[in-house]
Amino acid sequence: MSEILIPDTTMAEHQAALAGAYRYFEGVDLGGTPPDPNIADGDGLISYVNAATNPPPPALVEEQDKVSSVLEGLTGLVTAAVLANAAKPGNKGKHDPEAWSEPIRKGLGPFISGVNSETVTYNRDVAGVEVANQFLNILMSAVTRESPALDSFRKFLQGQGQTIRLQGESKEEGYQYACIGMVHEIFQTPEQRWIYVPKIRCYFTSFTRSSFKVTSGCASASKYNFNFRVEKFVAPFKIQTWRDQEWFRTDVDTFIQGHTRAAIEQSDNYFDDIFESTEA
């Protein structure tokens, strides 16, 4: 795991970062040729995750509602930038984590307190149908722990298990997934103080399965290779600056409104199916 923590900035530092964010989105050209909007999961672009130990006070609930609209606007801009960049020749595909890292770090830099990233990888060769299915069950358990948003990927893995049990003809299959969402963590300290941590979070999944036969004498056995990767980015919103500084609230609202107009003009729909399954 790697972590970059950036403390709340002064107004001068914020203005410099804001100018850089404007330059970044100008280079993206959100008003350009409409790209294929195949980026969101079946339930929509934004996934809401709320975690609270106890029912929060009404004032905090009201604040969460206001921050939700800000986070929704920022996540929409990141998605629009990824779509626009992916449509350009030679650029990263829309399911590549690097394609999302740049707009988050550069485009949202003035509004987030750094980025936390984590990667989990599995690469195994297993022999036999039973062992292969056991490994798939391990992957499904890992996905379930990671995020409810990955439920469709879990179902895909279940389908892989069925293909293996039926000794399907497909020799290689792949799956790619990208999801951006909002997280609202609200909890109470032992001193009864309420803490609210709003975040933007991205998940990326890449999975391939290949099968082959190993023959020894008169006997043959199936072997399977599984290559599985989950990458996660988490970017906390500068909630304290948003609370304390009117200029910060004005800047983030103006930033979202200006770029959202360009993003809406370039695409009629952000909410098509995100999932891709390919056969070789």
Image (cartoon, rainbow, N blue to C red):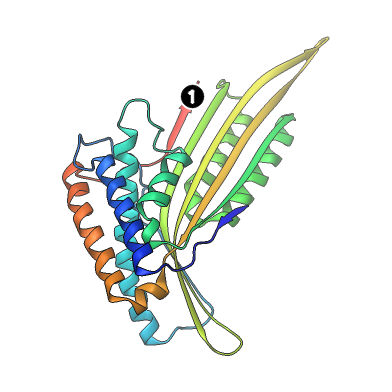
Q: Few, some or many C-alpha atoms within 10 Å of disc 1 (few <14, some 14-19, many ≥20)?
A: few
The percent position of residue 94, horizontal first and vertical second, equals 39, 37
Residue furthest to the top in view is: 217
Question: Residue shown at 38%/41% (left/top)?
Answer: 274
Residue 56 in view, yes or no: yes
Residue furthest to the front in view is: 12
Question: Is 173 displayed left or right of 211 in the figure?
Answer: left
Residue furthest to the bottom in view is: 191
Q: Give whichever of 77, 238 is nearer the camera.
A: 238
Residue 104 against residue 31 in the figure, above or below? below
Question: Residue shown at 62%/30% (left/top)?
Answer: 164
Residue 196 against residue 42 in the figure, above or below? below
Residue 148 against residue 101 in the figure, above or below? below
Residue 253 location, quadrant: bottom left
Q: Give whichever of 102, 183 is nearer the camera.
A: 102
Question: Residue shown at 60%/56% (left/top)?
Answer: 145
Question: Residue shown at 22%/53% (left/top)?
Answer: 260
The percent position of residue 143, horizontal first and vertical second, equals 58, 50
> Which residue type does callout 1 highlight?
Glu
Q: Give whichever of 203, 276 is nearer the camera.
A: 203
Question: Is 148 displayed left or right of 190 in the figure?
Answer: left
The percent position of residue 230, horizontal first and vertical second, equals 56, 45
Residue 72 location, quadrant: bottom left
Residue 129 against residue 202 in the figure, above or below? above
Question: Is 280 displayed left or right of 44 in the figure?
Answer: right
